[in-house]
Image: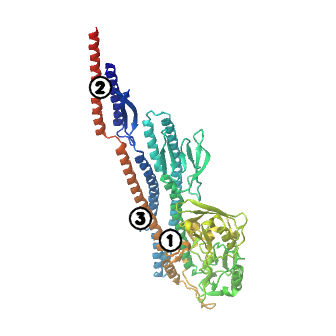
Amino acid sequence: MSLNEILHTATSGLAASQAGMRSVSNNIANVGVSGYARERTTISTATTAGRVTGVLIGQPERVADSFLENAVFRRGGDMGRSEAVASYLDRLQALLGAPGAESGIAGRIDAIAASAATMTGASGSPETIAQFTGNVQDALLSIKQLDGDVKNLRADVETELGYTVDRINVLLDQIHDLNDQIAQTGGQSANGAENRRVAAVDELSTLMKVNVRQQQDGRVTIETGSGQVLLDRRLRLLSYPAGPGASQPTYPPIDIRFADAAGMPGAATGDRIDSSAIGGKLGGLIDTRDRTLPDFTEKLGVLFTGLADTLNAASNAGTAVPAPATLTGRESGLVGTDRLGFTGAAVFAVLAADGTLVATTTVDFDALGPAATVDDAIAAINAGLAPEATAQMIDGVLSISATGAGNGIAVAQSDTAPSDRAGIGFSHHFGLNDLVRSETSALAPSGFIPADPHGFAPGQTAQITLRDLSGRTLTSDTLTGSVGPTFGDLLTELNTSPLGGFGVFSMDDKGRIAFAPGAASTGSTISIPSDSTDRMGTGRTFSSLSGLTGNASGSRSANVIPGILGDPKKLPLARLQLDAAIGEKAVGTGDIRGAEDFVENLANAVDLGKDGDSTLDSFASLLLGKAGAESAQARSAYDDAAARREDATIRRDNFAGVNIDEELAQMVVLQNSYSASARVITTASDMYDTLLAMLN
């Protein structure tokens, strides 16, 4: 080997040691940087004509395993989703209060039952009655407050969802730029850019579930978990309209669009994100916004409906002492020309201020015949009570007024054949003696049959949406009433619409419309985002009359009737003495038999329509217990997902991360190699000097 070859070989060894030291120093400097993958300088033997001529120095390479990195990305999606869900369910649980708290919904209902029981043993003192009505009002306010709090929570989810979409777009744009930088290196080292890209993909994977694939030119392509392309050689961005950050009936889907020249969402790709299947934090937020919180609100509405129905059933069975001069009902959805639909009989009486019977009549609805209308019943009341009282219906509201000064009106069920439409009595159906009222709900089943006219005018519509278990919209339809004039025609329209492809709509014997999902759409739920219908000018919509969803329960405008809340004597606790003759006492001031009805009704199961029969206490406990269980499950799921991701991260970092001891050992090896190469160069230089001296 010539001296030139010796010098060349030693010099290449010196350069190799320097390159190795450079990588070691970079590794040691980044030992505390999360996600940094250590560098390794590759070297190989240089040969010329079969002879070893030193060492070749390659580009510094990242020591990383794509399998381990992808494992972190996959588990990031699960962690991000469970963290988002757990966070908001924890907040929902905080709104519900501690189990057994008196201020909670279940505690409020228990307080109503307890104060009703107290009324039965206190001779109906004003204090106990005021406590009872106050507890009812407190329960209604608690339901309204909780409904509003959940609505605000849903608005917070929507706001965070918008921020998440923005962050995803920033990360996609950053990864796209880094792809270009890495591809343009032409095989040169791009470890810094690759580390930054891994960190960006790492964060992106917690925001949405992604599939990452490495390309030959160094780029990565990114797809959603369901295969929608987000990044290849062309950047795509998420497009979501900036809303007010408020709770809304429906939300638009998230479109996937090509990025334009300005880096903004441009032309549509045809792909969209419309369900929680997207995974990650984004999927968790969509699931919470579109499924979890609306489901809770819907069940809360069902609870309110059951509470109002239970209390009004008891109050409509009695009368106040003295009886009110006018009994004014609520908007039941019926008008005078509607089919009466009552069986049995009801007793209508005019009472003097001291409870003396002035006039009475028993209206036998069976005797009026199956073709009788509401106007026929009103005419029968007027004929029986004239000239002491008059009944009339205006805009769907029935009222009965005494004509004599100081007289009042009482209504009772026949003791032999109680009146019945949709399982409730005449007074209850029209709300003549209600305790609870709502401006937006009839608070009672309608009792319509398919042959009854629906009464919705042309142009009035209801948008009906069907969602699956993940909250994704399966289909939507606008109910117009154009098929025909009856409720049966509405059922036909619904069953022949796209909604009918997922289940069957039917009407029960109480006039409620129910949806039974098919086997392929088990667990799907109906919602009515918008409704402009108004049955014959009564103010009652398809949503409130159909009972399809608890969101139309009317809880947001519910209150105890102000007159009763302000004057305990106006609570209808007395019972009309049906066998009293004209001139005899028909009610007494000490009669509080109605308190027993409140106690009994609150303890009995109530018909909650599609949610079956249940006592209010059981349903409230189930509702709150389910929310608590879901919160605990979500927190447990997050802990598990976080632990799995941490395990994947540790395994990735153990392989790719910096180990100080290993780097220091490598540094000693490189130092020795550098020193040895330097000594070879020194020796070769001395040999050159000796050779030159000999020649001289």
- In the rendered view, would you say 56 is above or below 398? above
From the viewer's perspective, is 46 left or right of 465? left
Kind of residue at badge 2 = Ser
Position in image of residue 112 (x %, y %): 48, 74
N-terminal label among 2 and 1: 1
Q: What's the residue type where badge 3 is placed?
A: Ala
Helix, strand or loop at label 1? It is: helix
Question: How far apart are labels 3 and 2 at the CA level?
Answer: 75 Å
Which residue matches tag 3? 98
The residue identified by callout 2 is 677
Q: Is residue 148 visible?
A: no
Q: How far is mark 2 from mark 1, CA to CA?
A: 95 Å
Image-quadrant location for residue 553: bottom right
Q: Position of residue 221 (x, y in %)?
A: 51, 44
Would residue 22 appear left or right of 442 to someone viewing this image?
left
Say the numbered circle drawn on residue 533: none
- Callout 3: helix, strand or loop? loop
Q: Residue at x 52, y 41 (%)?
A: 173
Q: Is residue 372 visible?
A: yes
For badge 1, the amino acid type reads Gly
